[in-house]
Image (cartoon, grey):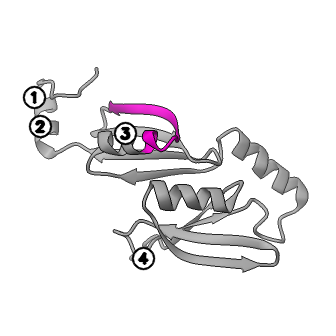
Amino acid sequence: MDLRLSSCALAVHDVDEALGFYRDVLGFEIRDDVAFEGTRRVGVGPPSQPDVQILLESPGADPDVPPADRRAIEDLMAKGLLGRLVFVTDDCDAAFEHIEAAGAEVMQEPIDRPDGVRDCAFLDPSGNMLRFAQPWPVERNRLRAAGIQPPHDQE
């Protein structure tokens, strides 16, 4: 069985504000923009992955969601506990500088992790956590395995 991700949904407070962040700051393309029954859902995705889209939608995008559930979703969003996405980058530090300069809320500055990545984290305008991970080159992992501390290690 061959399974591949096609799309995922991310609840946002304001679709236009989220679209501005994902399009203008992260450089994502708009894949779809649909208004339906008083709601709007916008699909965006990285240019390097044309077959993947992230659907930005309000917590009430599904008209069948009961009001109590909609409030629960909004409460989780307000605490930054609902959405999380992880992106791979070839330069974590450059991604950090670019996103920080755009005014995104920093959750974690770039650090090296023992699992073989250097990563950082931000909140999008709706409080969804976005991580940007840079896998270490094979040589870096070989040096660490040999007990040699490569540059940027912060142990």
Q: Residue furthest right?
A: 67
Q: Is residue 108 part of the magenta span, yes or no?
A: yes
The reply to whether the C-beta atoms of the residues labelled 4 and 2 are less than 8 Å apart is: no
Residue labelled with disc 3? 97
Q: In which quarter of the image is residue 21?
A: bottom right
Gap in angstroms between the C-alphas marked 1 and 3: 31 Å
**Quadrant the N terminus occupies:** bottom left
Mark 4 Cα-neighbour bin, 10 Å: few <14, some 14–19, many ≥20: few
On screen, residue 12 versus residue 109, left or right, reads right
Which of the numbered marks, if any, corresponds to residue 51?
A: 4
The reply to whether the C-beta atoms of the residues labelled 2 and 1 are less than 8 Å apart is: yes
On screen, residue 41 versus residue 69, left or right, reads left
Discs 4/2, front: 4
Q: Position of residue 111 (x, y in %)?
A: 34, 31
Residue labelled with disc 1? 146
Q: Magenta residues, as a range?
A: 99-112
Q: What residue type is labelled 4?
A: Asp
Q: What element carries label 4?
A: loop
Residue labelled with disc 2? 142
> From what the image shows, is residue 89 above or below residue 146?
below
For marks 3 and 4, the one nearer the N-term is: 4
Nearer to us in this view, 103 or 115: 103
For marks 3 and 2, the one nearer the N-term is: 3
Discs 1/3, front: 3
Q: Is residue 74 part of the magenta span, yes or no?
A: no
For marks 1 and 4, the one nearer the N-term is: 4
